[in-house]
């Protein structure tokens, strides 16, 4: 992963020096300094840093005003306030503006590093890997029950490696965004026939229509799952790619680097499997 | 299909493969197909989202996959399509598609890609697009690599 680039806005040369040493010791890159608020906004525009450390007292405007202007122009900016002052009023005002964290000088290097990584959304990886399963599981279970009007008994297995072995018909949905991943809905041709008959209310003999119908079913489950995960982690902006449909005998699907879960539903129409997994973050 | 959607893939292949040790890239036929990609044995799928949406399927025989993996590993013999070789080929598909995505970005089109899914088996078909797709056949050193491009502007 590339180094996190930090812009330091502080009018004191001594503070600048301390911040630079602290940040570089923790593996950050200080991409620039600004001594006034005006300069801070200009440097932000030019450098587009990953994060900003902001002092409160500066000659031309205070750190709150400077932050407000930066966030007005670049709403995705990550700003933390590092100042000699840290009181309730300052935190209340700053939070309203969109400043994400407040630290008092002298900031301890380790604490500064943790807070910076948090505001940049790094370190959430473990949290993400622990939490994405539940929304996808809910999406799978709800749709199997609602759309198929069938009871399902669900088992869940965590899969760290090894191939996914298809029952004959697999829909692969790519997942893009803050984490790259993929989902697979899989069943046998016989289950697909029964499933499509249930969904359409009549038997479907054309294989192409059948494939589209199963692909759409997969797309609905994947779409519901991704939306639920985006609600938990809005910054990830996960999206589905259009489905790829695989069919044939003896198909196995391998995703090196992927950590995934396998959900297996025993339904009255036959077994249906759903696998979802992600690789590390960007 | 819009030729502007194909050129980034052609350019990506010619930029990336030499970096992986490939000496000669010969461009074979470009054709338009409907329906299915008939797998040659190893098919790697990479999805694209945002302003260019669809799927790319890199298709080759297991023997070609072993040979290309060996090239990528500086000539180390690869006799079976094991985990190491699978990982190498996945990385190739990822790098070529990511490079094409960067070229799309330079045209002003925002594109994101998924992680590659490698499909291994005998006698299977893949449907990568509802519409027609382009088949780009490449001679990679002595092997055939078929790139099936089923994308459209989203």
Image (cartoon, coloured by chain):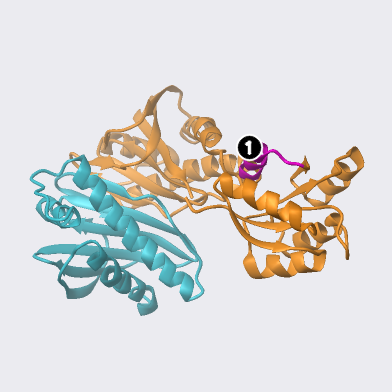
Chain colours: A orange, B cyan
The image quadrant of residue A121 is top right
Residue A226 horizontal/vertical position (percent): 53, 43
Which segment is the magenta one? A106-117
Q: Residue at x 45, y 43 (%)?
A: A280
Q: Is residue B102 left or right of residue A102?
A: left
Observer able to see residue A206: no
Q: From the viewer's side, name the closer residue of A210 and B71.
A: B71
Tag 1, which chain? A
Dot 1 corresponds to which residue?
A: A110
Q: Is residue A106 left or right of residue A256?
A: right
B70 w.r.t. A26: above or below:
below
The image quadrant of residue A105 is top right
Residue that lies at the very extreme toward the front in this rendered image: A14
Q: Is residue A116 magenta?
A: yes
Q: Is residue A260 magenta?
A: no
Q: From the viewer's side, name the closer residue of B115 and A67.
A: A67
Q: Residue at x 44, y 71 (%)?
A: B104
B150 w.r.t. A161: above or below:
below
Q: Residue at x 18, y 75 (%)?
A: B27
Residue A21 horizontal/vertical position (percent): 63, 49
Q: Secondary structure at mark 1?
A: helix
Number of residue marks: 1
Dot 1: few (<14), some (14–19), or many (≥20) neighbours within 10 Å? few
Residue B135 horizontal/vertical position (percent): 24, 68
Observer able to see residue A66: yes
Residue that lies at the very extreme toward the right in this rendered image: A89
Q: From the viewer's side, name the closer residue of B103 and B60.
A: B103
């Amino acid at each position: 992963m590339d180094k996190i680039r930090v812009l330091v806005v502080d009018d004191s040369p001594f503070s600048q020096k301390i911040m630079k040493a602290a940040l570089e010791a923790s593996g950050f890159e200080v991409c620039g300094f600004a001594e006034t608020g005006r300069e801070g906004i200009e440097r932000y525009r030019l450098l587009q840093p990953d994060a900003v450390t902001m002092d409160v007292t500066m000659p031309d405007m205070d750190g709150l005003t400077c932050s407000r202007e930066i966030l007005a122009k670049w709403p995705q900016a990550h700003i933390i306030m590092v100042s000699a002052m840290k009181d309730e009023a300052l935190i209340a005002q700053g939070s309203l503006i969109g400043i994400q964290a407040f630290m008092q000088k002298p900031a301890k290097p380790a604490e500064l590093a943790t807070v910076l990584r948090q505001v940049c959304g790094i370190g959430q990886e473990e949290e993400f890997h622990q939490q994405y399963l539940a929304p996808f599981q809910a999406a799978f279970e709800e749709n199997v029950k609602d759309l198929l009007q069938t009871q399902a008994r669900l088992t869940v297995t965590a899969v760290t490696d090894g191939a996914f072995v298809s029952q004959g018909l697999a829909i692969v949905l790519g997942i893009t965004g803050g984490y790259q991943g993929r989902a697979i809905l899989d069943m046998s041709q016989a289950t697909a026939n029964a499933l499509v008959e249930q969904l359409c209310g009549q038997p479907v003999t054309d294989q192409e229509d059948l494939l589209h119908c199963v692909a759409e079913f997969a797309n609905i489950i994947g779409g519901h799952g991704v939306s639920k995960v985006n609600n938990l982690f809005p910054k990830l902006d996960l999206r589905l790619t259009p489905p790829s449909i695989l069919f044939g005998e003896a198909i196995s699907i391998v995703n090196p680097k992927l950590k995934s879960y396998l959900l297996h539903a025993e339904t009255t129409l036959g077994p249906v499997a759903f696998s979802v997994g992600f690789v590390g973050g960007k | 299909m819009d030729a502007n959607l194909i050129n980034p893939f052609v350019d990506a292949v010619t930029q990336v493969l030499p970096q992986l040790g490939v000496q000669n890239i010969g461009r074979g036929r470009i054709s338009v197909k409907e329906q299915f990609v008939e797998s040659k044995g190893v098919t790697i799928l990479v999805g694209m989202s945002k302003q260019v949406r669809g799927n790319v399927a890199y298709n080759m025989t297991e023997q070609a996959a072993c040979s290309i993996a060996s090239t990528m590993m500086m000539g180390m013999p690869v006799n079976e399509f094991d985990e190491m070789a699978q990982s190498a080929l996945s990385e190739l598909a990822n790098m070529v598609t990511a490079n094409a995505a960067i070229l799309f970005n330079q045209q002003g089109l925002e594109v994101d890609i998924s992680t590659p899914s490698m499909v291994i088996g005998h006698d299977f078909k893949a449907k990568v697009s509802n519409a027609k797709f382009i088949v780009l056949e490449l001679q990679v050193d002595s092997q055939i690599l078929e790139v099936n491009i089923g994308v459209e502007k989203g």
